[in-house]
Image (cartoon, rainbow, N blue to C red):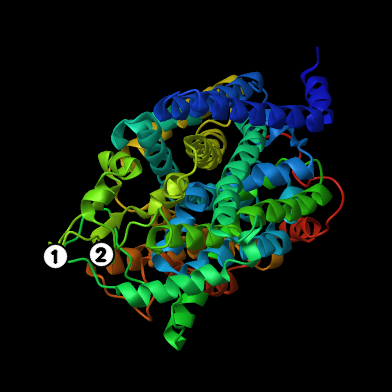
Amino acid sequence: MNTQAQGTRFVDRLGKVYALYTLGFLAFFALMAIIEQFGVGARTIGVLFLLFTLAIYATIGWLSRTMQVDAYYVAGREVPSLYNGMATAADWMSGASFVALAGGIYFGGYPYLGFVIGWTGGYVLVNALMAPYLRKFGCYTVPDFIGTRYGGNLARFCAVFVLVVASFTYVTAQINATGTIAARALDIPFEIGVWFGLLGILLCSMLGGMRGVTWTQVAQYIVLIIAYLVPLIWMSNEQGFGIIPHFGYGDAALRIKELEAEYGLQPAAEAVAGLRVLTTPHFDPQTSLDSWKFVTLALAMMAGTASLPHILMRYFTTPSVRQARKSVGWSLFFIFLLYFSAPALATLTKLQLLDPTLATAVVGKAVEDVMALEWIQNWAHVGMLAVQDQNGDGIVQLNEFFMRPDIVVLATPEIAGLPYVISGLVAAGGMAAAMSTADGLLLAIANALSHDLYYKIIDPQADTRRRLVVARVLLVGIGALAALVASLQLTGILGAVAWAFCFANSGLFFPLVLGIWWKRATREGAIAGMIAGFAAGSIYLWWTYTTGETWLSLDHLRFGIVGMPVSLVAMVVVSLMTPEPDAETQAMVDETRIPTGDSILAETH
């Protein structure tokens, strides 16, 4: 039976398939709630949640297996805009968004909303400048566009290099998140948890490529958004803020401000490796310098969003240019549902720990009573939390409660005293978020290396089977290396993600934008822009990270603000100093900007 016909019939049944999947997942959740009431232990429930969802994702990956190049690289270009938007949101809702963003707001307060604004605002740039035109171009990967638009293997290789560095940095953060979740749910060391997470990631992406990843990501989005909203709504209702806290948690923030003044935000007397205490006000007074930091962080994240290859690849899978543009709108809607909730979740969780009128508060309570709490013991056992009576008064002070920012969301159900089945649900959601992004990132790296480096540069005569074998071998090898790096915990999840965004915008943002919108951009200019921008950003990162010093208050989270201007200047100057592209290339650029018609590249990849 024809594979395309099978794929088409499946696409026609998507609504029914995912409705049944959602009902099945909710039924499983209800079953776990019932068996908890019958005395089944928390660890068993956590293991069942993870194994059940992993089994579903692996099954989708197996059923989506393919040996067709078009299906492996771009899902056959048959993904409807609604489902591509959902898959893109899952691809985007990484461990940073699900696991770490609320933790960043919990510890850093208002300034961390720069991430929210940047990551959502970036989709405006994607829609206006990138997605429809790259889909019209008809490429398989971002380096494919760079190599074809500018010509020559050197431009393609530079794009591959930037893609690999940015995506690899990003994927280590996702595997870090899977290790954190697996460590707590399965009660295993973090260093082993990262390998458990990698196994699940490879099961989803290795056999089916982009087709398998797409349908898995739709399933993962359904899990992660349910897992994020359920504890937030439950906790909000318990605290008296109603079932829609997004518009009413301002009173909680004001109460936190009072408590911070009462307790005093003092640095910890002794640091605990990898853990933090509250030292930043939830309401951070905004001076001109604070505003500059906020704007530069948001700008770096916006440009990074529009430069990340694994996100741009998602829009190569739609049937048409029009569907690609609609897909961006759906992506933004599905992303909004979580990002609008993250500040509320961070605020209500912080209130749970600080407000002495709530039974779950830990600050101001006796150390021995706090250490007797089961959830404190569980997270301390895996090295994610610590309580140290540093002044010897027997009372937990604000600067004596240490926690890893990445566990705030995962620990929220236990902090709020919710049934453990909610913790299992959140763990499954966090794993879905990290896995979905890691799937897309590993696929972006492997596809770029197999298609743009191996097939386009090293062995243009390679047949389909060899190309796909190379892609799968690379997928496994890169994943194993990423798990090894993640196990070293060189930086937190949010920090690693910010680095990835800045690597991408330093090297790729202007070569992509000007490649579409400036016919005069030349091969030499693009190469100069990629090399100079990436080098400038990387050197600045090394300098500020190793010395602790900054220039214009641009810390290591914002080094793209240094790389991007250098890239733009280098690209424009060199392009103007070299002969303009030939008439055929300029005509191709003109055609790219017409939002209708067939793809420019023939399907002969």
Between 278 and 8, the residue placed more toward the observer is 278
Q: In this figure, which residue is indicated by the disc labeled 2?
A: 397
Where the C terminus falls, by quadrant? top right
Residue 24 horizontal side relative to residue 360, left or right: right
Between 571 and 86, the residue placed more toward the observer is 86
What x and y, as percent, mark residue 202?
A: 49, 28
Q: In this figure, which residue is indicated by the disc labeled 1?
A: 391
Circle nearer the N terminus (2, 1)? 1
Work out how far the residue at label 2 is from the one at label 1, CA to CA, in angstroms. 9 Å
What x and y, as percent, mark residue 214?
A: 66, 35
Q: Is residue 451 above or below residue 472?
A: below
Residue 139 visible in image: no
What x and y, as percent, mark residue 584?
A: 75, 56
The kind of residue on which mark 2 rests is: Gln
Where the N terminus falls, by quadrant? top right
Residue 459 visible in image: yes
